[in-house]
Image (cartoon, rainbow, N blue to C red):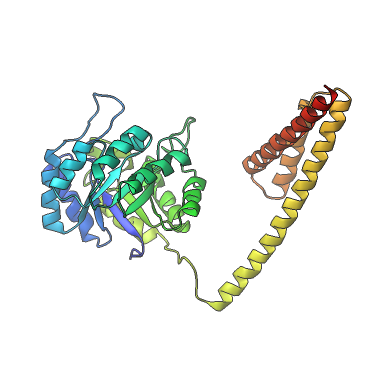
Amino acid sequence: MVDKRIVVISGPCSAESEEQLIQTATEINKTGKVDILRAGIWKPRTRPDNFEGVGYKGLFWLDKVKEQTGLLTTVEVATPVHIENCLRHQVDILWIGARTASNPFSVQELAEALKGIEIPVLVKNPLNPDIGLWIGAIERIYNAGIKKVAAVHRGFYPFEETAFRNIPKWEIPIELKTRFHNLSILCDPSHIAGTTEFVHEIAQRALDLNMDGLMLEVHIDPKSALSDASQQLTPTELEELFKKLKFRDPISDDSDFRNHLEQYREQIDSLDAQMIELLAKRMNIAEQIGEYKSKNNVAILQLERWENILSTRTTLGRKLGLPKKFIKKLLQLIHKESITKQTEVMRKLNGKTN
């Protein structure tokens, strides 16, 4: 059974017909695991000739779904008119999509339309990995007086080819949680994965990171779907997904577990302190090198030396079981700071000379 400490939102990418929507809602409701039905009524598409949703008439279908299943409903809104129409049909929750969240002008228009209204709002992350933009969208909705706001992590547009439709960049929702402890964050594995093949992997990672819920696309007949067919599960596949998922406890009350965990954390704290001390010593040496280069009129960047560092440290790291990508990123950060330190030293010395 799904752990009811998490919220489950599920339904088709788009409401395509009354029959399709009601059949999908009926089947996912039978699982007993879904709290909220999602359905796209208006679809922001890249190309004008793509299916852009059925529009206003789809809200009448949602009325019937609520009456027949008792499920709460949520719809993506991108304009004040969308909000007005959803409220007229008692849609329970609104969500702001990634494209809209990327535009502060659009979010502000929605915020103005939401003033004086009590309705929960979900804010998906913007297309680009810009946490400031995501926070800004959330703050605009908060400032409109909306008390129930949650974030939805749906991944970020990849500029390079990847296995997933959108890059998860888990560090961004984690950082968002550290800044807003009381903000609920849900994950949308369907949009991150782009194909049902990876939905389980993404959903499990979200649960492992203690996210507050899942938004999953489910269609009664995905092969005939008018949008995002490859990432939509069938109701049966949804049922199977929840059988496979492992639900984690946020923390354990077991005293032995806590004691052992505390011992591990003490080791981590000690190693972190040593690491920081070593980095400080390294930067002090970098400053001395900068001074030495300046006095001898030598350029800061020594490409051959940098390539040697990158190669030898990466080899050492891999021998010790560290991923090549991690080592490279870490070395690049250290090298960047080292260059900055040497540059600052040279500027000061040149200033004194002049």
Question: Is residue 350 or residue 249 the one in the foreground?
Answer: 350
Drawn side of residue 249 relative to residue 214, left or right? right
Q: Quadrant of the C terminus?
A: top right
- Where residue 314 sits in the image (x, y, percent)? 71, 40
- Where residue 98 sits in the image (x, y, percent)? 36, 38
- Where residue 344 sits in the image (x, y, percent)? 75, 32
User: Could you tell me which residue is drawn at 43 percent across and 49 percent down?
Assistant: 202
User: Could you tell me which residue is drawn at 40 percent across and 55 percent down?
Assistant: 183
User: Could you tell me which residue is drawn at 79 percent across and 43 percent down?
Assistant: 282
Q: Is residue 46 above or below residue 283?
A: above
Question: Is residue 149 or residue 329 the one in the foreground?
Answer: 149
Total numbered labels placed on residues in the image: 0
Residue 142: tell me if it is visible.
yes
Q: Is residue 64 above or below residue 351?
A: below
Question: Is residue 27 or residue 53 the one in the foreground?
Answer: 53
Residue 41: tell me if it is visible.
no
Question: Residue 3 is drawn in which quadrant?
Answer: bottom left
Drawn side of residue 182 relative to residue 317, left or right? left
Question: Residue 43 is drawn in which quadrant?
Answer: top left
Q: Is residue 174 above or below residue 96?
A: below
Q: Quadrant of the N terminus?
A: bottom left
